[in-house]
Amino acid sequence: MPEKKVVLRNCRVIDPRQIDSYLARDGFQALKKARDEMTPEQVIAEVKASGLRGRGGAGFPCGLKWELARKSKEPEKYIIANADEGEMGTFKDRYILENDPFTLVEALAIAGYAVGAQKGYIYLRAEYHNLLDLLINAIKQAKQKGLLDFDIELREGAGAYICGEETALMDSIEGKRGEIRYRPPYPPTKGLWQRPTVINNVETLMNIPPIILSGAKWFSQMGTAESKGTKVFSVSGDVNKPGVYELVMGSPLRELVEKLAQAERIRMIQVGGAGGRILPYAMIDTSLAYESVLGAGAVIVLDESRDVIDVVYKSLEFMAEESCGKCAPCREGTEVMIEILARFLRSEGETRDLKILPELAEVMRLASLCGLGQTAPLPVIDSLKYFSSDYQPKIRAQGGARV
Amino acid sequence: MSKIQQTSQADLLERLKQAQHRYGYLPQKTIARIAKALDIPVGEVYGVATFYSFLATKPQGRNIIRVCKSLPCFLKNYQMIIESIEGETGIKPGETTPDGRFSFQLTNCIGACDKAPAMMINSDVHTDLTRDKIAQILQAYK
């Protein structure tokens, strides 16, 4: 399946500082159509029919999320664009925002209309501070043109990966430590300031204007049974052409890493970042979709010179440092795992570690409160399954180190 | 209308960032003052101040170097960048130069993996780093 530009349709085409260049490409036509020709319920029905699911990794149906918040009788509601992209190996939202901030603004206004929200927020990670002016400018120009009467406020993080998790993000907007909340209640019921709140990933929202203009039928013709539309991928690591690529859902991993990013001598591919899957080259024809592997679209390619333990160690180190610390399985589990993996890095592993790692992984997967702790052990599990030969030489022989 | 729902704490993170910008870190006095102004316990303010990696409760250098140490930058030899910065500044990660010009930290993914290895100095992102580039980049920060 080919490259297809839906989300990235305006990137490197329009001038991200000039709204006129966006208007020349049907900019704000979707908002106009939604408001003039559709009821909020019809907008939601269209998004539901499109099959659009969350692009931040969790894959929750977007229209359903909107509907839950819409149906709440609370008078006050919020919509938030999650621009706290922090997953290891992910930079797609940075690329989207620096090239097309206008579509996000328009999409937020459409979402606000559909959900019945009084206000929208864009929560931008502190590391992307240099994109702040671009977003403020986009909102300002839209207001000056009389195209936007929806209130959008920009909130900036202060350096915390966990704030990309929706409940931690809301706590951060509320001025608290970004620690995750127990669920239920879910944000569409009780979110920001305990009011119904919809949080969507930047990429999810970018799909909204095209869906409104071209229709759910057009959108749902792309992709697989459970994964409609396209997906934007961030490709890095051992490739000749790292960068952002958009493919129709269900495209094979091979097309992305070998054809587009031009990787050679691949040994393994990490899909989904630090909490993602590690696939051996033999699985290069795996399709990229919610049914198989996807995450937020981080794809890190590793060539034949790489050792899987380095990859798993760096992934767990990331998670251990970024864990909010609220629940023990994640807080302690990630620490114990890096301790064990560090021993293997020093060729001081123990045979029993190979039994402890999967047991610990299972506990973390089942008992952690949010996606961070639940997915942190996935690279460990995959590495033991597909690359156990990397662990064996690093087990310490009795009576001394074996090299 | 939406203002009604917001508690005074909603301004906390923003205030802490402003104070950090002004003083270079968050002195105890400042934390106490903000706590009083927003009517929040000092412990809560301290908790927030220590949660986020861009906030500091100890004095920092005028310029903060953050070298990305996540996997994509690891694959592009970030160790070389760390050594180069150590050589130029005479400090190791976690330290501040005696003249207060630089603090040096390692950070997790900054979303520049396609141009790894990468680092931030203050809000500026520097990418496709090589050993030779470091000295020149640092020169611009006084």
Image: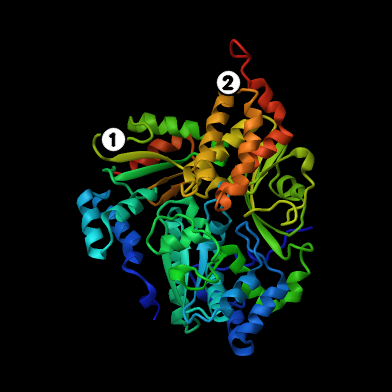
**Can you tell which mark lies on residue B97?**
1
SS state under label 1: loop
**Residue A155 position in % (x across, y down):** 42, 64
Which of the 4 image quarters holds residue A144? bottom left
**Can you tell which mark lies on residue A348?**
2
Indicate the amino acid at tag 2.
Glu
Which of the 4 image quarters holds residue A33? bottom right
Residue pushed farthest bottom? A36
Residue in front for this viewpoint, A135 or A381: A381
Answer whether labels 2 and 1 touch (C-beta < 8 Å).
Answer: no
Left or right, B116 with respect to B124, comes to: right
Q: As displayed, is residue A22 above or below residue A380?
A: below
Name the chain under label 1. B
Is the N terminus of chain A in the top left, top right, bottom left or bottom right quadrant?
bottom right
Q: Residues within 10 Å of mark 2 (few under 14, many from 20)?
A: many
Indicate the amino acid at tag 1.
Thr
SS state under label 2: loop
Q: As displayed, is residue A309 above or below residue B48?
A: above
Residue at the image point whose x is 68% and y is 35% from the top = A383
Q: Residues within 10 Å of mark 1 (few under 14, many from 20)?
A: some
Which of the 4 image quarters holds residue A47? bottom right
Residue in front for this viewpoint, B41 or A220: B41
